[in-house]
Image (spheres, rainbow, N blue to C red):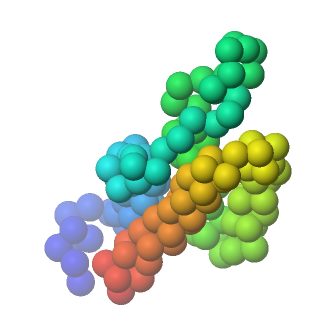
């Protein structure tokens, strides 16, 4: 029915939406997050201290966000929606100490986590429900 199917076999056409989905949840999501929410960014208390052993690496948060969205995307594609919640829980446990001690960081962390979930779910809906419908 589609002109692309006429020129390309199905095994080439079928993975394209998945490739697009996983490419878009990486760097484009990080860039849009920085544009939309840079006013809310705060340094965690561990970065405000002089002790170098407790500082986080530059870009680590962005990498965690990419991995978080990849995991969520895999679970959404597989229909394992409850596993998305487990991913968020594991991430929150890892940052529990900073979240409880620094309210500004907790707010920024929550904004980032909710943005990641929303971005992943909305992008899935756009690609797989709206475009491919």
Identified at 60% across, 57% down, the residue is 107
Q: Quadrant of the C terminus?
A: bottom left
Q: Residue furthest left?
A: 3
Is residue 17 at all visible to an observer of this figure? yes
Is residue 11 at all visible to an observer of this figure? no
Identified at 48% across, 44% down, the residue is 41
Q: How many numbered circles are shown?
A: 0
Relative to 30, residue 72 above or below: below
Residue 106, position as x, y percentages in the image: 66, 53
Horizontal placement of 19 versus 93: left or right?
left
Residue 102, position as x, y percentages in the image: 70, 46
Horizontal placement of 112 versus 22: left or right?
right
> Based on the displayed image, in which of its 4 quarters is residue 1 positioned?
bottom left
Residue 44, position as x, y percentages in the image: 64, 36
Identified at 70% across, 29% down, the residue is 46
Residue 88, position as x, y percentages in the image: 71, 59
């Amino acid at each position: 029915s589609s002109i692309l199917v006429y020129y390309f076999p199905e095994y080439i056409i079928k993975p394209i939406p998945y490739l697009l989905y996983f490419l878009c949840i990486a760097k484009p999501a990080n860039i849009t997050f920085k544009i939309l929410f840079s006013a809310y960014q705060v340094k965690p208390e561990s970065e405000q201290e002089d002790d170098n052993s407790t500082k986080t690496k530059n870009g680590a948060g962005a990498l965690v966000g990419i991995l978080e969205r990849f995991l969520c995307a895999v679970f959404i594609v597989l229909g394992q929606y409850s596993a998305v919640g487990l991913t968020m829980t594991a991430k929150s446990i890892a940052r529990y100490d900073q979240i409880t001690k620094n309210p500004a960081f907790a707010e920024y962390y929550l904004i980032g986590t909710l943005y990641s979930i929303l971005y992943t779910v909305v992008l899935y809906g756009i690609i797989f429900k709206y475009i491919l419908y």
